[in-house]
Structure formats: structure tokens, C-alpha cells
Amino acid sequence: MKELRVGLIGTGAIGREHIKRLCEKVHGVRLVAVTDKFPESARAAAAPYGVRVEPDEQALLSAADIDAVVVTSSSAAHEAAVLGAVARGKPAFCEKPLADTAAGCLRIVEAEQKAGKRLVQVGFMRRYDKGYREIKAILESGRLGAPLIVHCAHRLPAMDDEGFTAAMQVTDGIIHEIDILHWLVDDVYTTVQVSYPRRARASRGVQADPQVAVIRTARGLYLEVESFFNCGFAYDIQCEVVCDEGTVRLPDPPAAPVRHAGRREAALEMSWMGRFLDAYDTELQDWADALLTDGVPRGPSAWDGYVAAVTADACIRSQQSGREEPVGLPVQPAFYR
Ligand code: NAI
Ligand code: ISE
């Protein structure tokens, strides 16, 4: 295959970002069609690139001139779209979370194994971020000894959706840390506990913000994730790994330091769109390259999506019980090793 002909489902915020990326940056790909539950949204997103609009997900998945799909619809719609692609033997790149429950992810894992080859990649783009990759290389070198504690912060300036629930803060946000920490420290998650400090002033509606999740692992690591969706000041992602003989920290994105009026300052990112720009580009290029060369994706798998969802479900149980909850991960099938 010389060119990967792609269809995209869901032309919301990240859908439009990925359309731009697929049309302007990713080599070897041709975006053929898009669709959305709201046809006017699909038409507006398709128009600048002269891309076809399909009436719905089924039509797009079945189109003979589409080799692979990108799923950027709302989280609750991911499972049906990915299962539809797998049933047709078409590779699917699906934004996180793979499905909004572990049971949904398991249905995808089972369908993929039945299909007999890897078809699914999950949009855990932080694995493609240069800073996280540097941390992983340093940990793997053994120079700092073994990891003991990880401190993370995942802060957004504001969450406008008043109906954004405590559980969504896990499946939408903390799920990134669940995946990246699993990949970084390569350990088995055993328990999780979610706690709440005082509710932040800017928190509104049913939001329960901020939250702190603590994940413990089989080798005894303590992974702490602060999730703060209304921090007001920036889109701020922090990660520091404390090891036996040193620490390593995620670099802040570069920004020109300004000296002015007796102060030293540097601009901070205000949105996820800018913070992980390079990582999104690299992940989609890697997805396309792998499909064009080997016919199978090599990025975060459906199993990774399932591991993250099982852990997220345990976090949600802990939100409800107020206790530490077991994660209870099954053994990874040979298919995914
Ligand atoms: P959004 O609400 O802006 O867009 C979702 C779009 O999907 C909407 O246009 C909606 O009409 C459409 N849609 C819903 N169900 C559909 C269906 N059955 N068929 C076709 N279209 C359907 O949401 P946003 O922010 O773009 O997020 C989309 C997904 O991407 C979410 O799962 C989110 O977690 C993930 N995401 C990932 C990010 C990352 O950093 N990797 C960043 C932002 C979002
Ligand atoms: C958003 O959906 C994303 O996936 C971003 O990467 C994340 O940082 C943010 O918390 C989510 O709302």
C-alpha cells in the first residue's frame, strides 16, 4: 500500500485538530471522508480540505475507498465505532479512552483477538512526547537506581461543562497519567485511592475538583496524581520520578524568558492543543507509517486501553467508597506481548 486512505468519525475539538494534521502534516495519508452526529459540523470541518462527508458512522466504516479510520467522537461513542472497524477488518486509531468502561474495552480486546491481528491503536499521545521519552530512557539506563515515588499534576485552566462528573475527571483526564505511568515504570498496578481536598472555588455544577489519585504497584511504588480542572492559571502537566539515587522531571515546554519591570517570567501553555502538538503529530505519523509498512499498528494497543480502563474503574469505585480499591488486572494475553 502506497497511501493510507482514512475516514474520520467525530468532527469536534480534537477531530478538527486531527483533520488538519492528517491533511497538512502526516505523510502517506489521504483523508477521504469525515462524519459527525451533527452533519453541519462535519460539513464545516470537511469544506476547507475538499473532503467527502458521509451521512453516518456505518456508511463511513463501510466505504470501499477507506482503508483505516480515526475515531474522535465523544468517549461514549468510541466502542461502537472501533468494534465496527474491527468487524470489517479495518485498522482504527481511537482517541482515549478506548471505551468509557473496562467492560467496553474488553469487548474490543476480544473482537481484535478474534480478528487475529492487531487493528487498534489508542490515542495515548504522551508516549510520543519527547519529555516523557527522555524520562523513560533515563529510568531504563538504571543510572538513578529504581523508581520509588512519582508526583504528577494534570491541571487545566477551566472546565466549562457544569455537568462534568467526578468519574469523567478520571476517564477524561487522569487516564492519561494512568497510561503514561504504567508505560514509564513498567509495573503492575495493585490498588488505587482517590481523595478530595477542599472543593476549589472555581469548581461548579456537579464537578468534584480537584482530586488526588494514589496508585500503588506490585513492586511497592507510590504514584500520586493531582487532577485539577479549574486551576485558572494554565494547562500545566507535571511529572517527577523519585528514584533511589536521584530524580527526573518532565521538562516544561520551552518559552522565551522575559525580564520586565523587575520580574522574570515565561509564558505557560493554556490548552492541551498546544502542549502536546508534536506528540500528536508524531503519533499519527507513526500510526500511518506502521500501517503502510507492516499493516499493523505498533503504538498503544487495545490492551493498553483496557489496562487504563480497569484502573480508571477502580478509581471510580474508590471515589464512591472513599477507600483504597484493588485494581484486579488479568494477565496480559500472549497476543499483546
Ligand atoms: P467534542 O465534544 O468537541 O467532539 C466530539 C464530536 O463527536 C462531536 O462533534 C459529536 O457530535 C461527535 N459524535 C458523538 N457521537 C458520535 C457518533 N456516534 N458518530 C459521529 N459523531 C459523533 O469532544 P473532543 O474534545 O473533541 O473529544 C473527543 C474525544 O477525544 C474524547 O473521547 C476525548 O477524551 C478525546 N480527546 C483526547 C485528547 C488527547 O489529548 N488525546 C484531547 C481532547 C479530546
Ligand atoms: C482532554 O480530553 C485531553 O485528553 C487532554 O489531553 C487532557 O489533558 C484533558 O484533561 C482532557 O480534558
Image: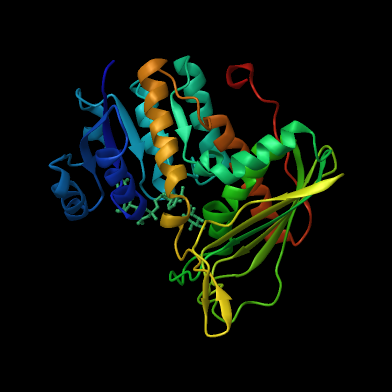
Residue 247 visible somewhere in the drawing: yes
In this rendering, the answer to whether 297 lies above or below 178 is: above
Front in this rendered view, residue 149 or 199: 149
Residue 128 position within the rendered picture, expressed as x and y whole percent measured from the top left = 52, 39
Residue at 47% x, 40% y is 123
Residue at 22% x, 53% y is 38
Residue 179 visible somewhere in the drawing: no
Front in this rendered view, residue 221 or 81: 221
Q: Is residue 196 left or right of residue 83?
A: right
In this rendering, the answer to whether 320 lies above or below 129 is: below
Q: Quadrant of the C terminus?
A: top right
Residue at 34% x, 23% y is 90
Residue 151 position within the rendered picture, expressed as x and y whole percent measured from the top left = 73, 56
Q: Quadrant of residue 322?
A: bottom right
- The chosen color scheme is rainbow
Q: Quadrant of residue 209?
A: bottom right
Q: Is residue 23 left or right of residue 268?
A: left
Residue 140 position within the rendered picture, expressed as x and y whole percent measured from the top left = 73, 32
Q: Quadrant of the N terminus?
A: top left
